[in-house]
Image (cartoon, grey):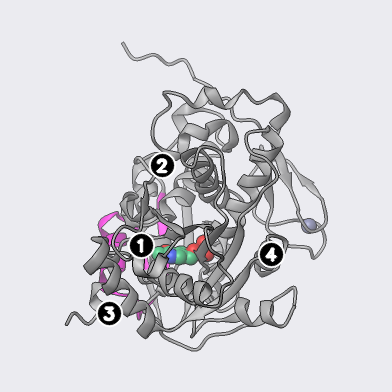
Amino acid sequence: MISDIETETGSLLLNLTCPECGTVHNADVVNTVCSNDNCKSTLFATYNLDTAADKSALLGRPATMWRYKEFLPVFNEKNIVTLGEGFTPMIPIENLKQFTGDNEVFWKDESGNPTGSFKARGLSAAVSKAKELGIDTIATPTAGNAGGALAAYAARAGIKAIVYMPKQTPKVFKDECRLYGADLVEIDGNISDCGRLVNEQALLHGWFQVSTLKEPYRLEGKKTMGYEIAEQFNWQLPDVILYPTGGGTGLIGMWKAFNELEHLGWIGSKRPRMVAVQSESCNGIVTAFNAGLSVSEFADGGFTIANGLRVPKPYADKQILKVITESRGTALTISDEQMSLALKEIARYEGMLIAPEGAALWQAFKKLKAAQWIKAGEKVLMINTGSGYKYLENIVVD
Ligand SMILES: *Cc1c(COP(=O)(O)O)cnc(C)c1O
Ligand SMILES: [Zn+2]
């Protein structure tokens, strides 16, 4: 017999708070960005962490990101749209020790997520919450992976998905959207152009948009990487985390997770130094960081094989720069040629076919170690955000 009793998740969500002006928003209704005057900042979900259980409650939970459901925004179990995302493995560098020396260096390998990237985390959370709020059509601009993830989770939820993607994106990213039943609109331009056009249409047709950090819950999904890093490293965070930065959701999300975990008393005050890695063609955050600025400027040098990094002006650039600075981290760029070499090196010697975005981190690690910014004995984590299998169209195999 099927029970119709609604099971509560135990979510401790209280409200949505603006990190810029402090305005509190009611989380029982549909939200986008801060509604206070012209603030328009990304909103952060706030939880009642004082009433949370001890971390031993995690024992025996499913090996997905929903094991942290008290710290995710969905109130009713039946609204959770899951395909098994999260709780991805930590894989140490095994054979390329001539580069890692006395550093312990790990990948957090996100390539096994549904649709082959960590976008699954964000879209599982956002689509679940949209379902809970009764939304029937969701639209997004995408550089590739977010579109596929939205399409899959929307298919699972019975929600209509509309995806705006640059024409230049490899075919597999387009085909998966169509296979999952999304409406795909190909745009002659970059993700910023897609964002502008989808926004016009969304306003006309009443679609809900889940554009990066203009919707509050993708951040919550990506935040779970921070919870996992803590749990999988036995509640001791690494010294350095390298992150391939597009819109910055993962970077901001991990930082938010660490603060929540400290509030819970599950970790101490030690934080990793957070490193934002960008492509040479899209280097707005690196330029701003090096100039000591708190906002970035539009920067688009055109095509990169790491399409997830082609975000000319991240919406939450202020928050990204704040995390880098607060963590005493740094920011650097890697060329497409170097990404391609790194992708091949990791495949050949480590047996992992990682995304070019992840491959950029391997070169960044080498640079930072050579510059002694990464010091002897420090534990380093690189987030391989996606599967290399989706990018092979742009990789010359020799
Ligand atoms: C989207 C994406 C990124 C960048 O993630 P943000 O959260 O936008 O910073 C990095 N790598 C891959 C594979 C992606 O799909
Ligand atoms: Zn605000």
Nearest to viewer (mark 4 / mark 2): 4
Q: Which residue is at a point 32% across and 79% down the rendered structure image? A: 340
Q: What element carries label 1?
A: strand
Mark 3 Cβ inside 8 Å of ligand 1: no
Q: Mark 3 points at which residue?
A: 394
Q: Which residue is at a point 82% across and 51% down the rendered structure image? A: 22
Q: Where is residue 244 in the image (x, y as percent from the top left)?
A: 49, 67
Query: Which of 56 and 71 lies nearest the eye of the viewer?
Result: 56
Q: Determine whether 180 is above or below 4 in the image.
A: below
Are circles 1 and 2 on residues that touch, CB within 8 Å?
no
Nearest to viewer (mark 2 / mark 3): 2
Dot label at residue 183 = 1
Identified by mark 1, the residue type is Asp
Spatial CA distance of label 4 from label 1 is: 43 Å
Identified by mark 3, the residue type is Asn
Q: Determine whether 135 is above or below 289 in the image.
A: above
Q: Around disc 3, counting alpha carbons within 10 Å, would you say few (fewer than 14), some (14 to 19), or many (20 or more)?
A: some
Query: Which of 123 and 60 lies nearest the eye of the viewer?
Result: 60
Nearest to viewer (mark 4 / mark 3): 4
Q: Name the residue under label 2.
A: 87
Q: Is mark 4 on a helix, strand or loop?
A: loop
Res. 389 visible in picture: no
Start and end of the magenta stretch?
160-184
Query: Which of 375 and 384 lies nearest the eye of the viewer?
Result: 375
Q: Name the residue under label 4.
A: 328
Indicate left or right for 394 with 90 as reference: left
Res. 121 visible in picture: yes
First reached walking from the N terminus: tag 1 or tag 3: 1
